[in-house]
Amino acid sequence: MQTMTGIGPVLGLTILLETGTTSRFETAGDYTSYCRCAQSLRESNNKKKGEGNAKSGNKYLSWAFSQAAHMAVRYEPKVKAFYDRKYQKKNGIVAIRAVAHKLARAAYYMLKNNEPFDVDKAFG
């Protein structure tokens, strides 16, 4: 996990221990939803129908990926470019959560395939 920009020993251990085995998640979307990195917004016919289950999932993984996103934006140019594009369209909180979502998806594939982090695959 420490090959990912923004994740040190504490965040890496937190993510590993809170995730457990990746076999319990069928897709990366299931994992990001468990990490609270996916929207809980429900829409139908472009009308907002609610934001149910906003608190379902693991709050510690949400915190860990948010912290990793803040550090990755500071130290990785490709992540910073992605953040800047999102920041121009929305606000800073939405942009950081988008980075956290991408990092959570990358972490899922890292853990599932047992491979190091590749910034080009995640943000390229």
Image (cartoon, rainbow, N blue to C red):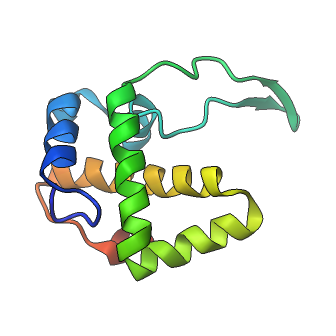
Q: Is residue 83 above or below residue 25?
A: below
In the rendered structure, the answer to whether residue 113 lies left or right of residue 24 reads left
Q: Quadrant of the N terminus?
A: bottom left
In this picture, residue 101 sits left or right of residue 95: left
Q: Does the image show residue 124?
A: no
Image mark count = 0
- Residue 27, given in percent of the width and then of the height, sits at 36, 40
Say left or right for 25 vs 124. left
Q: Residue at x 44, y 68 (%)?
A: 73
Q: Residue at x 37, y 46 (%)?
A: 65
Give 93 or 21, whichever is nearer the viewer. 93
Q: Is residue 106 above or below residue 123?
A: above
Q: Quadrant of the C terminus?
A: bottom left
Q: Vertical placement of 88 versus 13: above or below? A: below
In the displayed structure image, the side of residue 111 where residue 80 appears, left or right: right
Residue 62 % position (x, y): 40, 36
- Picture coordinates of residue 29, whole percent (x, y): 44, 40
Q: Quadrant of residue 61?
A: top left
Would residue 115 be seen by someone viewing this image from the given angle? yes
Residue depicted at 78% across the width and 31% down the height: 43
Q: Is residue 46 above or below residue 5?
A: above
